[in-house]
Structure formats: structure tokens, C-alpha cells
Image (spheres, grey):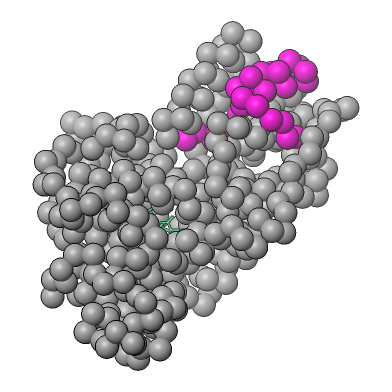
């Protein structure tokens, strides 16, 4: 092939990038293209992370003699117009699973056929490609444990090194990238988390070196906060999940961590089979009416971290300030919204999607449905009691003290039951939204 376009989406890296490697091996010239798609406008924190990641990808490609070619508009139209401009023979891209991504892929297939372009889709977004593992008699795994067994037994593709050099066609305008303002960086939730492959790889290596061995012991410890925080890098593809699995595997304590990567893959294969996951119950389930007289007000209290349950409020405030929340926190607030208040999981999922740096369709909506009992949980009726969860996972109250300022002076575990404290100690912290169940 003479010229191939590599269309980047959420695979913003040069290491272990099957589509990029194939293009460099098979074509004389390669156009690494990213299209800023107005239909995917993200909240400020995620936009800053994306722009950092694109700048970093551009630097990596420039170091290899090429550039990141940036355009704005509809990714399919821009790709086809670029293909005509450079006389490309093919378009290579990483395959993805959300409804939007698959619609884009289908349009790309049709347009490339019309233009006689060779379109090839590659793995790269997960460790094991979604749809590769299927149970006997089904198109996807509905329960995690059998998926995990099959996932652990399958052979993973090889990890690919970054290409050494790329050649761009002559005379191509690279296009500019917007730069986030200092104000956005400072004020957006998560705006100060550095995006990009360099930052992601640095975090991957140092976390594996220093924290992986403690992961099983500490993964649910809210104040300990020892999980990898690699989720935004995995979401944008700055870190390859396949390479991360390879780097962790075989080290002391690796299995529980690698298992989380399998959960990530699990939700990708569920989403591939059930693209309506963002709005439709995966398993229909008759929920009872809300347990509160004013559901709108209860949702606002939950959203603003003012439910009167300190562990719930701490987690919601962590989300609002950091654009990230500890997994144990996500489970507690999700259960509180859907099982304690009995409000609709879609409200929670949409709020998360508006703030999380790592928000993505498979993991956000898959997990919300799991928590709400409409998804892949084999015990859909389980309710996480916030007081018991607080006692187990924040026994000394340090997590709550970190995020709930009003209670900052309350010592020890008494912080989890502020309604038992004299009013003067509560600093205006609200009464519980629903009667405490101990
Ligand atoms: C209600 C709810 C919503 C969630 N929304 C998202 C989301 O939008 N995006 C997202 O990436 N994760 C989501 N998760 C899963 C999980 O909470 C985060 O992946 C994790 O907290 C990220 O932190 P970490 O990188 O330190 O994780 P680690 O514990 O270090 O795990 C490593 C990686 O494994 C994957 N992982 C871990 N737990 C899960 C899980 N339960 N499901 C799927 N993948 C997992 C993530 O990619 C994570 O980065 C959600 C969980 C719940 C309960």
C-alpha cells in the first residue's frame, strides 16, 4: 500500500497500537488523523485530559518524523476527505463497542466501500477483543465468573513496540490543537490530572513497582486510596490494557488487579451485545416507588453530597472536586441512590458521565446497571448499607474528614453518625435524608 490513514479515537498512544503498527508495516506513508468531533463534546475536566493526550500523541509522532493531523467535524466525512486529498489506499482504526462508535464504524464501512478504500478494524481497546469469547449457545457472557475463566485461559495477542519512524505525505497541513486555559485546568474537576501516554506510562510503571503487591489488601480501603488511578488513561487509550495486563501478570499480588481488567473487558463484550445499555434495563426488574416524598429534592441532595450520610457525601464530593471516585465509593453511592432512595439508575449514570475523567459507556453504564440490580449482578437484590460500609472501609473516618469539611473536627468513627452529635459539632451538616438503618 502507498498511503494509509490511521484514524485515532480513544486509543491515543503509539505503544502497543495494532492499527498504527500494521499501517507502518504495510504502507509507505501514514497519516495519523484525529478528528475533533463536536458530537462528543465532553465536560471540562475530560476535555483538558483529552487535549493533553492529543498534544502528547502529537509529540510522540513528531519524534518519529511524522505528526498528528487534526481536523474538526464529522470523523467519517473528514476521513474520506483526507483520503481523497492524499490519495489513500486504506483506513485503519481500532474497533470500539459503544452505540456511537459502532454507528461511526458502520458509516465508515459504507463510505470506504463507496470510495474503494480498504478499511481495516483492529483490536486495542481491551485485553481480549469483545466478541472473541462466547459461551456455548450465547453471543456474550452474562455472568462474570465464567467469563473470567475463559478470559484467563485464552491466549492474548502479542504486545507491540511503538513504531520507530513514520513518513507523512508531503505538503499536509497538520492543523492546530486547542490549548486548555489555566483557569479551566484549575477549576474543572480533575483538570490538573495530566493526560497523555507519557504520564500514563509513568504512572503504570511506578504503581506496579510500588503498589501492586498491596492491591488485594488495600483495594477497598477508602482513605488508603491505593488503587492505580489508571482508569482515565485506559479510557483514552493512553495506556494499553493489553500491555498493562502483561506488565502486571506474574508479579506478586497480580491476580486481583488483572481480574479488574477482565471486568473492564467483560462490560465491553456486554455493551457489544447490548448497545442499548445506556438507557434500557439489561434485565427488566420492577423496582418499588422511591422511598422519599420528594424524589427531585433527594436526587439533588445526593448529587450535591448533602444526604446526611457522611460516607455517601464524601464520595460525591470527591467526584465533584477530583473528577474521579474510589470504586468502593462508587458502589456505596450507587446503591444508596438506587436501592436506599429507589431512584432511577439513569440519573446517577448521567451525573457520573458528566464529571468522571474515566467515564465510558461500557464501564459506567455496565456498573450502574450492576449496582441497580438491572445488570449482570447474580444477586440483584443486594443493598449496601452505608453505615456498615463506612465501618468496614473507612473505620477511622479519615476518608470522610478529607472531603466533608463541616465534620472536619469530629474525631474517630463517630463521624459516620453525625445525628448523634450535639448540633454545635455538626457545622451545619444536614440531617439524614432517610431514617438511618443500622
Ligand atoms: C457505579 C459505578 C460506575 C463506574 N463508572 C466507571 C466508568 O465510567 N469508567 C471506568 O473506567 N470505571 C468505572 N467504574 C469501575 C471502577 O469504579 C473504576 O474503574 C475504578 O474505580 C477506577 O479506579 P482505578 O483506575 O484506580 O482502578 P483499579 O482498582 O486500579 O483497577 C484497574 C483498572 O481496572 C478497571 N476496573 C476496575 N474496577 C472495574 C469495574 N468494577 N468495572 C470495570 N472496570 C473496572 C479500570 O479500568 C481500572 O482503571 C464504575 C464503578 C461503579 C460501581
Left or right, 236 with reference to 52: left
Q: Residue at x 55, y 64 (%)?
A: 204
Which quarter of the rendering shows the N terminus?
A: top right
Residue 184 on image: x %, y %: 66, 55
Q: Residue 76, image x and y in percent?
A: 60, 22
At 37% from the left and 57% from the top, the residue drawn is 303
Q: Among all residues in the image, which is located at the extreme top? A: 114
Residue 202 visible to the viewer: yes
The verdict on residue 302 being magenta is no
Q: Between residue 117 and residue 67, name the one nearer to us.
A: 67
Residue 268 in the image, given as x and y percentages of width and height: 38, 42
- Relative placement, left or right, of 227 versus 186 is left
Is residue 80 part of the magenta span, yes or no? yes
Question: In which image quadrant can residue 29 be found?
Answer: top right
User: Measured along the vertical axis of the image, is residue 397 above or below residue 42?
Assistant: below
In the visual, does 94 lie left or right of 131? right
Residue 115: x and y in percent read 63, 10
Highlighted range, magenta: 69-96
> In the picture, residue 70 is in which quadrant?
top right
Q: Residue at point 38% right, 71% down?
A: 314
Q: Is residue 289 left or right of residue 204?
A: left
Farthest residue in the bottom direction?
411
Q: How many marks?
A: 0
User: In the image, is residue 281 above or below residue 421?
Assistant: above
Q: Quadrant of ligand 1?
A: bottom left
Of residue 431 and residue 381, the one placed in the foreground of this image is: 431
| Residue 223 visible here | no
In the image, residue 89 sits, relative to residue 33, either above or below, namely above
In this orientation, which residue lies closer to the viewer: 317 or 149?
A: 317
Amino acid at each position: 500500500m502507498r498511503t494509509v490513514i490511521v484514524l485515532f479515537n480513544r486509543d491515543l498512544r503509539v505503544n502497543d497500537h495494532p492499527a498504527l503498527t500494521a499501517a507502518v508495516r504495510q504502507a509507505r506513508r501514514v497519516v495519523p488523523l484525529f478528528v475533533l468531533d463536536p458530537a462528543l463534546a465532553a465536560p471540562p475536566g475530560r476535555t483538558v485530559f483529552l487535549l493533553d493526550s492529543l498534544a502528547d500523541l502529537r509529540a510522540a509522532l513528531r519524534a518519529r518524523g511524522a505528526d498528528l493531523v487534526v481536523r474538526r467535524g464529522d470523523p467519517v466525512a473528514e476521513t474520506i476527505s483526507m483520503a481523497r486529498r492524499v490519495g489513500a489506499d486504506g483506513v485503519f482504526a481500532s474497533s470500539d463497542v459503544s452505540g456511537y462508535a459502532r454507528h461511526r464504524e458502520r458509516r465508515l464501512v459504507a463510505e470506504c466501500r463507496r470510495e474503494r478504500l480498504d478499511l481495516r478494524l483492529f483490536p486495542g481497546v481491551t485485553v481480549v477483543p469483545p466478541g472473541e469469547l462466547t459461551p456455548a449457545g450465547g453471543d456474550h457472557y452474562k455472568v462474570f465468573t465464567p467469563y473470567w475463566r475463559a478470559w484467563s485461559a485464552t491466549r492474548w495477542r502479542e504486545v507491540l513496540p511503538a513504531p520507530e519512524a513514520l513518513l507523512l505525505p508531503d505538503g499536509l497541513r497538520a492543523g492546530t490543537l486547542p490549548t486548555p486555559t489555566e483557569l479551566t485546568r484549575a477549576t474543572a474537576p480533575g483538570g490538573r490530572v495530566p493526560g497523555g501516554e507519557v504520564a500514563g506510562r509513568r504512572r503504570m510503571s511506578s504503581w506496579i513497582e510500588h503498589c501492586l503487591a498491596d492491591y488485594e489488601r488495600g483495594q477497598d480501603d477508602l482513605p488508603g486510596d491505593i488503587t492505580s488511578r489508571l482508569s482515565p488513561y485506559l479510557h483514552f487509550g493512553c495506556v494499553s490494557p493489553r500491555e498493562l495486563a502483561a506488565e502486571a501478570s506474574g508479579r506478586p499480588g497480580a491476580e486481583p488487579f488483572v481480574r479488574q481488567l477482565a471486568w473492564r473487558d467483560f462490560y465491553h463484550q456486554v455493551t457489544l451485545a447490548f448497545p442499548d445499555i445506556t438507557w434500557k434495563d439489561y434485565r427488566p426488574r420492577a423496582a418499588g416507588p422511591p422511598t422519599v416524598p420528594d424524589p427531585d429534592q433527594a436526587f439533588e441532595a445526593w448529587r450535591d453530597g448533602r444526604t446526611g450520610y457522611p460516607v455517601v457525601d464524601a464520595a460525591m464530593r470527591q467526584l465533584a472536586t477530583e473528577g474521579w471516585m474510589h470504586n468502593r465509593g462508587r458502589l456505596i453511592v450507587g446503591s444508596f441512590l438506587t436501592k436506599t432512595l429507589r431512584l432511577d439508575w439513569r440519573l446517577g449514570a448521567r451525573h457520573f458521565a458528566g464529571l468522571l475523567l474515566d467515564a465510558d459507556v461500557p464501564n459506567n453504564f455496565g456498573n450502574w446497571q450492576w449496582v441497580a440490580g438491572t445488570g449482570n449482578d447474580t444477586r440483584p437484590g443486594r443493598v449496601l448499607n452505608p453505615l456498615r460500609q463506612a465501618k468496614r472501609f473507612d473505620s477511622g473516618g479519615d476518608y470522610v474528614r478529607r472531603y466533608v469539611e463541616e465534620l472536619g473536627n469530629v474525631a474517630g468513627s463517630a463521624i459516620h453518625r453525625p445525628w448523634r452529635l450535639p448540633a454545635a459539632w455538626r457545622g451545619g451538616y444536614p440531617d439524614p435524608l432517610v431514617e438511618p438503618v443500622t
